[in-house]
Structure formats: C-alpha cells, structure tokens
Image (spheres, rainbow, N blue to C red):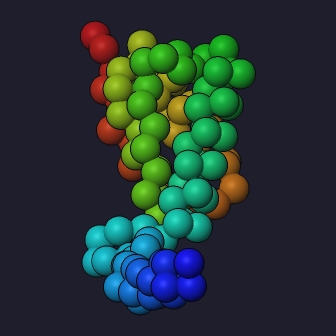
Amino acid sequence: MIIRTLLAAFVAAVALLTATGCAVTRGQETVGAYIDDATITTQIKARFVDNTQVAATSIKVETLNGVVLLSGFAKNTTEKSTAESIARGVNGVKSVRNEIVVRP
C-alpha cells in the first residue's frame, strides 16, 4: 500500500514537472486577455441587439487584444457607422476595424 502511494506521488510529481499547462506561445493571448476580448465581444453584440438601427444578426464581431473587427452586411451607411460607433463606445476597445459591406 505504501509503495502504491509513493508511486502515485512520484507519477503526479513527474506529470506536474513536465506538463506545460496553459503556456502562452508567440501569437496567442493570455487567459486574461482572452476573457477581456470575449467580454468586449459580448457587450458589443448585446448593444447591437438593443439598438433598433443595427441588424445584430447581419454583423459579425471579433475581438483580439482589444482590437474589434466588424464584418458582415449593412442595409445602409448609417447602419454601418452606427455599428462602429457602438463598438467604439465599449470599455476596453482599443480600436475598431470596420469591414462591414453596405448592400446595394
């Protein structure tokens, strides 16, 4: 029984020492940054739903390190600029890339 306990402890120690866990490599976000970006995206989408001038289902929102990318389609330039204005108004947004296309 003692041998099993020692063996289990040894295996656990080796696993902890060799596991990389949530290591961040070049090009990846930290866990905290990922959570912040997800929060920004969620807040923008929620504001789109609340706003009657923006079709929330037609515009895609992506956030990476505080930079928001808006893509999709708008009915007119007013909707496109309103979506960008809403995104810029969310706390934590560093910049907005508005690639929304206005449908003719």
Tell me if residue 39 can be seen.
yes
* Residue at 69% across, 56% down: 91
Q: In the rendering, at what x and y percent does residue 75 appear? A: 42, 13
Q: Nearer the viewer, residue 81 or 49?
A: 49
Q: Quadrant of residue 36?
A: bottom right
Q: In the rendering, at what x and y percent does residue 56 appear? A: 53, 20
Q: Quadrant of residue 98?
A: top left
Q: Nearer the viewer, residue 47 or 53?
A: 47
* Residue at 46% across, 51% down: 63
Q: Residue furthest front?
A: 1
Question: In this picture, is 80 found above or below 4?
Answer: above
* Residue at 43% across, 58% down: 64
Quadrant position of the N terminus in the picture: bottom right
Question: In this picture, is 19 found above or below 76?
Answer: below
Q: Quadrant of residue 18?
A: bottom left
Quadrant position of the C terminus in the picture: top left
Q: In the rendering, at what x and y percent does residue 68 appear? A: 46, 50
